[in-house]
Image (cartoon, rainbow, N blue to C red):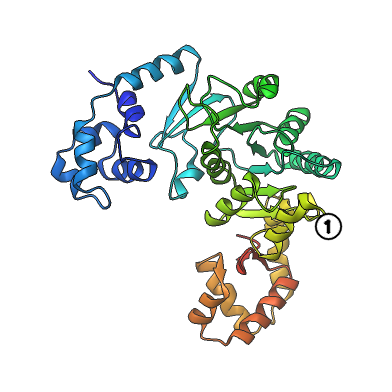
Amino acid sequence: MVSELIYQLSLCQVPYIGNVHAKKLCDTFGSASAVFKAPSWELEKIEHIGEIKAKSIKKFRDFARAEKELAFIEKYGIKPLFLTDSEYPQRLLNCFDPPAMLFYKGNADLNAPRVVAIVGTRNNTEYGKYISEKLVKSLVRVNATIVSGLAFGIDTIAHRCSLKYGLPTIGVVAHGLDTIYPPENTNLAKQMIRHGGLLTEFRSDTKPDKHNFPSRNRIVAGISDATVIVESGLKGGSNITANLAWDYNRDVFAVPGRITDVKSEGCNRLIRENKAMLLDDPDYLIAIMGWKENEKKKVMSQMHMFPEMTDVEKKIIELLRKNNDTGIDEMNFRTGYSSSSIASALLNLEMQGILKVLPGKRYRLCDQ
C-alpha cells in the first residue's frame, strides 16, 4: 500500500504539475493521496488543470523515486514538510507559489514569531560586514530568527553572527541536503543544524544549478516577516529576493550606501523606487515591525494626545482599522476626499507617529 508521504513526494514529480497546481489540487481534494485517487473528470474541472494534466496524474506510476527519497530522509533524520502539515512554514502559504514539499534538518521553529531575512552581495565590504553584525546583534533583544541563503558574503556573515549571539538561524539552500554549497560553509552548516537549520525544496541528488537559486530566493522572502538587503549591485540574487518579498507584500528594508559604490547601487535603487524602506538604524526595523513591547501603548497614547483630528484624518484611521495596508488611490476612492486632502492628512498622521509609510506609498497604523 502506498503511504500518504509517498503520494506527497510524488505529486510534484508528475509531468506538467508544479507547485501552484499541487497547492490548488490539495486545497480542492484535501490530500495528495486524494488527488491521485480522484477520477479524471473531477480533476479536469479544476481551474487550470484540464484534460492533459488530469491524464498525467492518472498515468503516473513512478513511485520508486519517492521511495528512494523516503529512504534518504529516514536515514539522515530529515523532516519532510508537505504544505498541509502543521509544521510547514505558514507564512509561505500566504504566497501564491509555495513549495508543495520542503525538506528540513534542524531544530529552529519555522513558524517562529519573528523572522528576518538578511541577504546581500557575495563580495561584501567591511561596511557591509559591520552593518550586518550590528543588525543581528540588535535583533537579539526581540529574539528574532535569522534567515539567509548560506552563500558567501553577507549571507555567511548573517549566519555566523546569529550563532555568535545565540539567535537561531536558518539557511535556505538551492540543492538537496546530501551536499553543501559552497563546500567551504560545511562546518558552518553543521553548526546551524544544531542551532537553527537547513531548509530546501530540492530532493537529494539535486545539484546547485544556476536556475535553482531564484526558487531558493522566493523561500527566503516568503518565510520571513521582513527582508533586509545590506549590500547589493543592480543585479543578483539579493535583488531578486527583495523584489519577491515586495511581491509577497512583506516589509523590505535596504541599507543605503554611497552613490559611487557599485555594491550599494541595488540598495539605493530599491529605496529610490519605494520598494524598500531606508534602514539606517536597526531600531527602526524593530519599531516598524511593531516588535517593541511598548509600541502599541505609545501609539495609542499619541492618538489620545491629538484628539482634535480633522474629519479626513478620522476617516483615514477608520479605513485603516478595517483594511490596513492601504494605498492612496484606494483611500481616495473609499473616503471621497481629494488627493490633496488625503496627502495632507497622511503627512500629519505620519508626523504624529500614528501611521507608517510602507513601500509603494501604502500605509499602515503603527498599532496594527
Quarter holding the N terminus is: top left
Q: Position of residue 367 (x, y in %)?
A: 64, 61
Task: Name the quadrant containing residue 166.
Answer: top right
Image check: 188 left or right of 95? right
Q: Nearer the viewer, residue 353 or 333?
A: 333
Q: Is residue 208 visible?
A: yes
Secondary structure of the residue carrying tag 1 is loop
User: In the image, residue 198 lies at what x, y percent?
Assistant: 58, 27
As rendered, which of 28 and 242 lies closer to the eye? Answer: 242
Where in the figure is residue 352, as x and y percent of width and height?
74, 72
Image quadrant where residue 301 sits: bottom right
Residue 289 visible to the viewer? no
Q: Residue at x 53, y 32 (%)?
A: 209
Q: Residue at x 31, y 44 (%)?
A: 27
Amino acid at circle 1: Thr
Left or right of 202? Residue 301 is: right
**Relative height, residue 23 to residue 341 (above, below):** above
Please tell me how many numbered marks the rendered image carries.
Answer: 1
Query: Going by the picture, which residue comes out furthest to the top?
Result: 75
Residue drawn where x is 65% and y is 32% of the image: 150
Quadrant of the image containing the C terminus: bottom right
252 is higher (above) or lower (below) than 81: below
Mark 1, Cα crowd under 10 Å, few <14 / some 14-19 / many 20+, is few
User: Which residue is more in the foreground, 163 or 219?
Assistant: 219
Instruction: Please indicate whether residue 343 sits to the left or right of residue 54 in the image.
Output: right
The location of residue 103, given as percent across then percent down, is 48, 27
Q: Is residue 9 above or below residue 325?
A: above
Query: Quarter of the image holding residue 22?
Result: top left
Near-viewer residue (104 or 235):
235
Q: Give the residue pinned by disc 1.
A: 260
